[in-house]
Amino acid sequence: MMGAKVKVKEKTNWPVTIMLIVGLITVAFPMYLTIVIAFKQPSEMTNSISGILSLPKSWSFANFAEAMRVTDFWHSLGNSILITLATVLISIVIHSLIGYAIGRNKTHSKFYNFAYLYIVSGMFVPFAILMMPLVKQTAQLRIANWFGVIILYVVFYMPMNVLLYTGYLKNIPVALEEAARVDGASTWRTYWKIIFPIMKPMHATVAVLTALGTWNDVMTPLVIMSGSGKNTLPLAQLNFQTQFGTNYNLAFASYLLALLPILIFYIICQKQILNGVVNGAVK
Amino acid sequence: MRKMNNRKLTFLLITIPILALFFCFNTLPLIKGVIYSFTNYKGYGAYDWVGIRNYVDLFQDVRVGKSYLFTFKLAIVTTIVVNIISLLLALGLNSKIKGKSALRGLYFIPKILGALVVGYIFNYFFTYILPVIAKALTGNGASMLSSTKWAWVAIMIVCAWQAIAMNTIIYISGLQTVPEDVYEAGAIDGATGFQKFKSLTFPLILPFFTINMVLCMKDFLMVFDQIMSLTKGGPAQSTESISYLIYNNGMSGGQFGFQSANAVIFFIVIVFISVFQMNFLGKKEEQL
């Protein structure tokens, strides 16, 4: 019995390892398809599968240069980075603050308990119902642009992030703040000096979840920003779809360009991203 | 005492502006949406009150009915498929394998990619590659995307391809919470293979199953990007999801008021399902 158990612990399960490696084809194939088509010329794309799937004759970056020009790549990338970064930074500041105010008071105050339930229940409101009134509202306020999109994201991600922050605060003893208060520090100062730094793991989770959601979102910029003449990276793919026509090589070069920033980011911060996603879902 | 009041004041000064912001861009448009749903507003120009007319029409509208059927079919089937595959994948990725963290990292990639662009890539695959293979195998080289019978399956595959990554990671973190000695005790009792999974592992990761079911279902009921990039609701309106229909007809089809009513019903449905799922699965968890 003991011998068998030790053996199970040490032996690598090769059949499962091999099956999982083979299964990776499902992930790799669409990526491979994108890369080879993006580098090819239309003349190389004969109507047979081998024509589509074979490696390109020469690795030319011409498609990418053309795709960048057609989709106004650098501006779209700039807008996406601006919107995502601003949303993440504002969310961390604002959502952690209100999470703190609510988390420290909701057990003994009806008002804060109501505020908590009020904000968190916003999670159930689908964008579809807000969409049409928001188009009117942002137009009236003259924020039917990237600025409006940032404000909307900060509001949309508030329910989830407040839930995360208040949950995390339960594990931070109030005694920590009381010590600072005895020393004469104000609540505001105590928050920035003590509580905000302590919540760093939760900031990382919030940043990852908010960033992934906003970076890839299409619907909000589509309905809010489409009149402003500006694009985010995904929105550019949608808006320039007709311009690619049947030049799939150009289209795929553009798709690859749109996927590349987040892929690079993932390679660099893989561990933080996986941790953030798991923390956010499980809490 | 003064200190305490200062503390209370600080909290109020933080809370009230943020609550106001939340009200302005979440609750206010929600209320406006409900109000629009009782009008015949086209999205421009003058409009009149029509009472509950939109709601009455909604329940008789074939296109709306079809979009609900399609969305639910897609959401339910995809949720089941995704959860079965990701649970198997998670069991594999949690066993004694070589290159564990690299494999986990690679299997997560679909999740980080934008659904719209992924949809475009698969669109090409379904239009130009799969039909050629299908023709060689079965003699029928029609694209799945242009068939009213099969288009939803193509959408399901694309949705699942991305969602499996997320659910797998959640199941893995669930499996890691199962202590090793549970298995040891189970092994003494003679539990093996599927039996071990059914009576030991699964009950212990049930909370994670709940999370995945709720997340999956909610995401797929709101499906939009994949429809946009794969079928645009076609062929013959057979793949119009509720969100897509509200967007398409409400924003540019002159049905602002009518689709607002649709959105209100959709909102109620989402709340109902989420609450039901959490209660139902929550009770099951308690029983164990």
Image (cartoon, coloured by chain):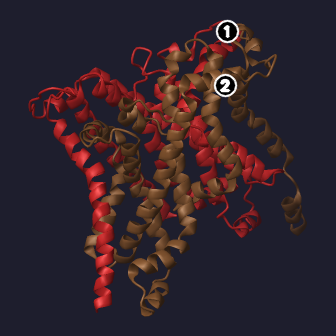
Q: Which chain is brown?
A: A
Quarter of the view holding residue B127: top right
**Label 2 lies in what chain?**
A
Residue occupying image coordinates x 57% and y 41%: B163
**Label 1 lies in what chain?**
B
- The reply to whether residue A102 is in sight is yes
Question: What residue does disc 1 label?
Answer: B135
Quarter of the view holding residue A225: top left
Query: Does dot 1 land on a helix, a strand or a loop?
Result: helix
Judge by depth and name the residue closer to the eye, A249 or B58.
A249
Judge by depth and name the residue closer to the eye, B74 or A111.
A111
Tell me the amino acid under the disc marked 1.
Lys
Residue occupying image coordinates x 41% and y 68%: A97
Relative vertical location of residue A118 with respect to residue B52 in this rendering, above or below = below
Image location (x, y in percent) of residue B113: 60, 38
Residue occupying image coordinates x 40% and y 25%: B240
Image location (x, y in percent) of residue B74: 47, 32
Tally the numbered discs: 2
Q: Nearer the viewer, mark 2 or mark 1?
A: 2
Tell me the amino acid under the disc marked 2.
Phe
Residue occupying image coordinates x 70% and y 24%: A33
Judge by depth and name the residue closer to the eye, A55 or B80.
A55
Gap between marks 2 and 1 measured at Cα: 33 Å
Residue A173's tag is none
Image colour assigned to chain B: red
- The reply to whether residue B157 is in sight is no
> Could you tell whether B189 is left or right of B114 in the image?
right
Judge by depth and name the residue closer to the eye, A175 or B86.
A175
Label 1 packing within 10 angstroms: few (<14), some (14-19), many (20+): few
Query: Does dot 2 land on a helix, a strand or a loop?
Result: helix
Relative vertical location of residue B251 with respect to residue B269 in this rendering, above or below = above
Question: What residue does disc 2 label?
Answer: A64
